[in-house]
Amino acid sequence: MKRLLFLIIIGTFCVFDLSYAKVDDDLEQYLTEPSTKFLNPKISFKLSSDFNLTDNYQATKKKSEYKDIDFTSRFYGKFTLNDNLYIRSYLKFQREDPISKSSDISSNKAKNRYFENGAIHIEELNINYKIADFSFKIGKTNLDFGRSWDWKRGIFAYKLAKNYKQTEKLGFGISYKLGDEQKDGAYHFNFFSFIDDNKYLDNSIITKRDLSDNLNNKITTKRGLKSYIASLDINFDFGEKYREQEQLLYQFAYLNHALQNKEISLQNNKDEKSFAFSLKYILPIYHNFAIDAIYEYVKINNVDGNKNISENYNNLSLISKIFNNYNLTLSYNQLSNKEKFANGFDKNISEISFGYKFEETIIFDELLLQAGYKNQRTNYKTILDKQNAIGLLLRYTKNF
């Protein structure tokens, strides 16, 4: 039944034959004035596909030396009924490794990986209504918690921040906008109450998804909408300089994730509580040269519902945009895991990469070629695990 529902939803978002408009790349749709028309249907799509080739050519453990070719595709849809009411969808094709695959990767013999375990799943499907400075959302969505996990920032380093990316939540929320970006700043107050989607729209096709411990009901969300996120986004637009907009963006977010961890005792079971602070600055320095920088700090207490485990993340990413087509990306992401009665570990990922964006054609709106180097270090207190890799990314983007 779930598989049938999944296919029906995919079909629904692929058969409309209405006038097309470009979809906004930002997953959070901010607010406009109320519409004067009751029905003004539009539909828009965006496709972004990544081809990744990685050569983990050197590592402390030989099992970590392997080549990896992978493919990821993201399909965004927006069906607008009028300027106030719209439906958003986000389908994703990516690798979905089962639990049993972990044992293969951790074996003593390295194994190259080529286009395996691909699966399509629904990451977002929600109804949105906006009027004046208020916006309401209900359905399945990704939460506004952090920014460093943005897949458009390099090849490697952002993947560490994906540990705390909050995806596939079912619930409802409200947003309120105050102020103006070009005057004293725009303040977006957001609240969303949710449960994890591990029952309704969590299925996948091609390869069956394996949601780790959630699949075996070891870690579950408590009944009722006891989980919530409250966030504040502050945006400043300082105007155009050298044909680029100078912008400053802050984010403060608090997340209470009501988890039930059945692998630990009741007295050690606590709600996972997280805090995120992000600072993003886009600075045009001169003609054809601008900097896009992000610093982010995330603190997570009671990881997976276990009060004895906490994590701290520090992420820094700097993209230098040169002549509109070239970019130089530098990233450093750091994780510190602490556990009572255990050693914990520290993990660092550094990246330097260089990319070229081809001019828009009738075939694509954006074609990016990025090549880079990654250094990864994991300190388990008793042993230091190192890994070096080079990678190539080809990204195709088209708006319909």
Image: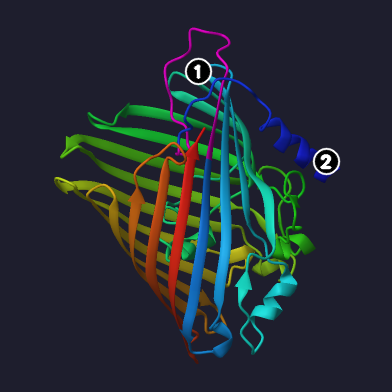
Q: Residue furthest bottom?
A: 382
Q: Pick whichever, 370 or 86, lies toward us.
A: 370
State whether residue 144 appears in this view. Answer: yes
Query: Left or right: 284 with respect to 350?
Result: left
Residue at point 72% right, 70% down? 99
In the figure, 336 relative to 43: above or below?
below
Q: Is residue 43 magenta?
A: yes
The local crowd at label 1, few if under 14, some if 14 to 19, many if 20 or more residues have their Cα within 10 Å, is many
Q: Position of residue 276 (x, y in %)?
A: 43, 54
Report the span colored magenta.
25-46
| Residue 357 shown in magenta | no
Residue under pointer 2: 4
Percent from the top left, x then y, of residue 237? 25, 35
**For marks 1 and 2 on the same chain, the one whose residue lies earlier in the sequence:** 2
Disc number for residue 83: 1
The three-letter amino acid code for the residue at tag 1 is: Asp
